[in-house]
Image: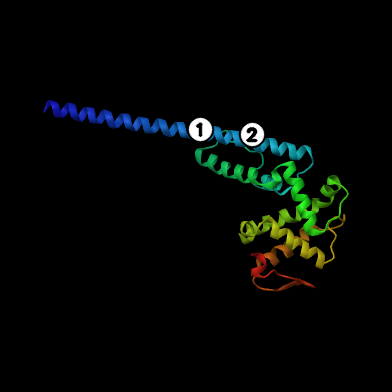
Amino acid sequence: MANTGIGAFLDGVSKMSQSLTQISEKAFRIREYRKEASRLASIANKRVERLEKNSLQSSPAYQTYLATGGRFGVKGKTYNEVQAEVSRLKRFIDSNTSTISGVNKTLKDMAKNTGIKYKNLEDLRSKSAKFFELSSKVEQYLRTVEDMASAIGYQKIWEAINQYTQDGKIDLSAGEVDIDSMVASVSNALAEYDKPVPTIEGWYSLKNDDLS
């Protein structure tokens, strides 16, 4: 009986030791996860500061950063909140327009696709501000109202805006352009791409195979 009692005691001690080890390992993983999240937040916030310093707040990445909560960080957040913040951080860091070089490349690609004429990057940035503003608002509209922005992507949004402005003979660089009035038209055309319904004269929704 004594041996049985000692065996049970030792077994209990072993299980307790294993449990404590698991708890310790979990605490270590959480601590390392938070450390990595802090590192990513530092990278992302430095990118944000560079965009602001260079007056590139119109970039899609910066606009999404503002729309999803602003400054990155993990201080005071629960583990689940840190997980959500890491997802937001990775989306921002992975975005082409979260860096100055990425913005410049995106601007050049956009100008090529839309026919915007420019003298230099400074001139292009000035002319593209409203294009970016419109594309960001369309993306946000599709995300919140239609739940389909991620399936379309910015390239298709730009193509739709390009078609819309060409057919409507709209100059986005003009000072009197009302961006907000265009959001619904462009968004609805993209959302209804499977039904070719005219929204303005000469402007039709994109067909399904146009988005492939």
Please state if 17 lies on the left or on the right of 40 as rendered: left
Provide residue 44's location: percent of width, then percent of height: 65, 38
Q: Looking at numbered disc 2 in the image, what kind of residue is underneath it?
A: Ser
Please state if 210 lies on the left or on the right of 87 as rendered: right
Tag 2's secondary structure? helix
| Residue at the far left in the pictured view | 1
- Which of the 4 image quarters holds residue 181? bottom right
Quarter of the picture containing the N terminus is top left
In the image, residue 104 sits, relative to residue 204, either above or below, namely above
Tag 1's secondary structure? helix
Q: Looking at numbered disc 1 in the image, what kind of residue is underneath it?
A: Glu
In this orientation, which residue lies closer to the viewer: 129 or 159?
159
Q: Is residue 192 visible?
A: no
Dot label at residue 46: none
In the image, residue 195 sits, relative to residue 72, either above or below, namely below
Reading the image, the residue beneath label 1 is 32
Quarter of the picture containing the C terminus is bottom right
In the image, residue 175 sits, relative to residue 87, either above or below, namely below
Reading the image, the residue beneath label 2 is 42
| 1 or 2: tag closer to the N-terminus | 1
Provide residue 33's location: percent of width, then percent of height: 51, 35
- Which of the 4 image quarters holds residue 72? top right
Say how many tags the image has.
2
**Label 2 neighbourhood size at 10 Å, few (<14), some (14-19), many (20+)?**
some
